[in-house]
Image: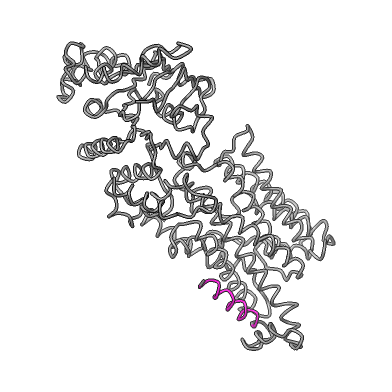
Amino acid sequence: MVPAILLILVVVVSAGMGAVKLSFGEVLRALLHPSEAGDAGVILFSLRLPRVLAAGLVGAGLSATGVLFQGLFRNPLADPFVLGASGGAALGGAVAVFLVPALSFAGVGAIELLAFAGSLIAMGIVWNLAKAGGHFAMENMLLAGFAIGTMLNAATAALELRQEATNPGMRILAAWLHGEVTVPSWTQISFVAIVEMAALLFALPLARQLNTLALSEEYAAQLGVRVERLQILVVITGSILTALAVSLGGLIGFVGLLVPHFLRLIFGPDHFRLLPAAALSGAVFLIVADTIARTAFAPSEIPVGMLTAFLGGPAFLYLLNHRQRSSSL
Amino acid sequence: MSNILEFRNVGFAHGARAILENLSFCVKEGETVALIGPNGVGKTTLLRLAAGLLRPACGEIVVRGRELSQWGRKQLSCNVALVPQHLEVPFAFRVDEIVAQGRVPHLGFFGRLSGEDRDAIESAMAAVDIVKMRDRVFAELSGGERQRVKIAIGLAQQPKLMLLDEPTQHLDLGRQIELMSLLRRLVDRGITIVAAVHDLALVRENCSSGILLIPNAPAVAGSVSELLRVELLERAFCVDRPGLDRYLAADGSMGGPDRLRGSESEGNDGQENRERLRPLGEQLASTKRGRYPRHTRHGRHQDKD
């Protein structure tokens, strides 16, 4: 409940911040009476709100995937990109910027489209490699994720090196690779929001089963959990959430790792409680981070991924240290 | 008493390596059966087969009169609980949250605990005396405490048959005695126990019968006194006679090597145990196809470690 109220407050406050400052009241009035909002309405509905909601959706998707993948791999250090999604998204983004920049579909740009496709394809390849031989082995999946991610990153680097240094696409790609939330169309936001909500609802019963999986695959199996089916469903749900997130915000690190960690300290390790809490808190966290990223150095912006990495690094080290001391997080 | 678990000519292999071959035995309701044998002989495999976690390459496994493949997974979990050797939990789950997982086979799609489920969890924790530590984090418990929590998970399943894989491993003497006394209480509650145990003194004191898995030779099932003979132990554990004699002489609770050498020195306990077990073998021998010889059979293992 608290994260939900916090999320609404953060959306309203964040939407008021920027080059043209809007008060809390102005934003609320514009939201309640859009037709009478005038210039404030144009700023809000065409620029601020799409960006704020996009940041929220990215944060929610990455944090929820963090909870799902950490439960799946029984490892609190797993993040949404552990299955090679970042490599696929990076290559997709590079292809979009350098080879087919004019591509678009239903108002969605080339980077978003190819990043979404690239991350899904990369995770699909990893999944197929992991279940080669008919058996679905989680260790193989992690290793394949690492290998495929590395290969695709190398391919991205090769594509970049072939470009002239003056190519404006270089700056666009660099910013995107560091995690930059776009200002998407309302169609894109609606699509992502609907699919993300559906994926989160679908994941809720899976989250409860992840509590049983925490004991071990063998234990879960003997307690009646269909372990392989659970693993496959979690991989598919997490992959879709990650692909949606990278399509809106590029490669934003640490969110999927840190938010679940902090929430475990507050709510405990129950995945069923963590999943909705992580989605809401991840949204709050990334909206705040993105607001800082676009206003702190105005008129220029820094990619929000750089900010989360900059703040996330020390926080991660703190958690690692805390974990070593308690050896039970 | 009816049979709760039967293995009929069961074989199992990891790839080309045969672990168990042509193994037959049966366990009656209310028994405490020790599973004895050297490391790597297939004790854990046997328990996992009985819990339905592995499928036998050949033969049949029958639980409460029904072949394993005829059981639904959750239905089987409500009847058979496996308490594995190790339990490592990577997150800071509390003891009561861990024990609650034992109710999973009883829950519906949404997985909400009913009043009955909560009662079963409380009762399981009370049975192993861990109510006081319910709010502690599982990962911070000692080996003995963890063992009790594992058994509580099994009890929360409300099973008829509990399979324990080396439950006394890493426990000090006091905790071992406590644990065996706990297992006796479980038998009093109507739960049949099959436990892989290395300590032969604990086997002798606490088990009504046993199954001895011998590398590269047929397994032997029978009363504890029948199994704990020097000749059998020598073959099963690949140990020389003087070494075994010294071990048995040092272990006063075993009655020394002389006591284990001949059937005439078994005493009344051994005789009683043998009488209790005999019908198992006779029943097997008289099954329709008549292919189950009295008492056993044939566990084979390639690994001589």
* Relative vertical location of residue A134 with respect to residue B95 in this rendering, above or below: above
Drawn side of residue A129 relative to residue B144, left or right: right
Marks counted in the figure total 0
Q: Residue A163, position in %: x, y?
A: 78, 57
* Relative vertical location of residue B62 with respect to residue A265 in this rendering, above or below: above
Dominant SS of magenta comes to helix
Q: Residue A157, position in %: x, y?
A: 70, 53
Q: Who is closer to the viewer here, A109 or B119? A: B119
Q: Residue A219, position in %: x, y?
A: 45, 41
Magenta-tinted stretch: A2-16
* Relative vertical location of residue B143 with respect to residue A283 in this rendering, above or below: above
Q: Quadrant of residue A251?
A: bottom right
Residue B257 sits inside the magenta stretch = no
Drawn side of residue B118 relative to residue A162, left or right: left
Residue A6 sits inside the magenta stretch = yes
Q: Residue furthest front?
A: B1
Q: Quadrant of residue B250?
A: top left
Query: At 53% from the left edge and 22% from the top edge, which residue is drawn?
Result: B57
Quarter that holds the N terminus of chain B: top left
Drawn side of residue A200 relative to residue B55, left or right: right
Q: Quadrant of residue A285?
A: bottom right
Q: Who is closer to the viewer here, A38 or B194? A: B194
* Relative vertical location of residue A329 with respect to residue A107 in this rendering, above or below: above
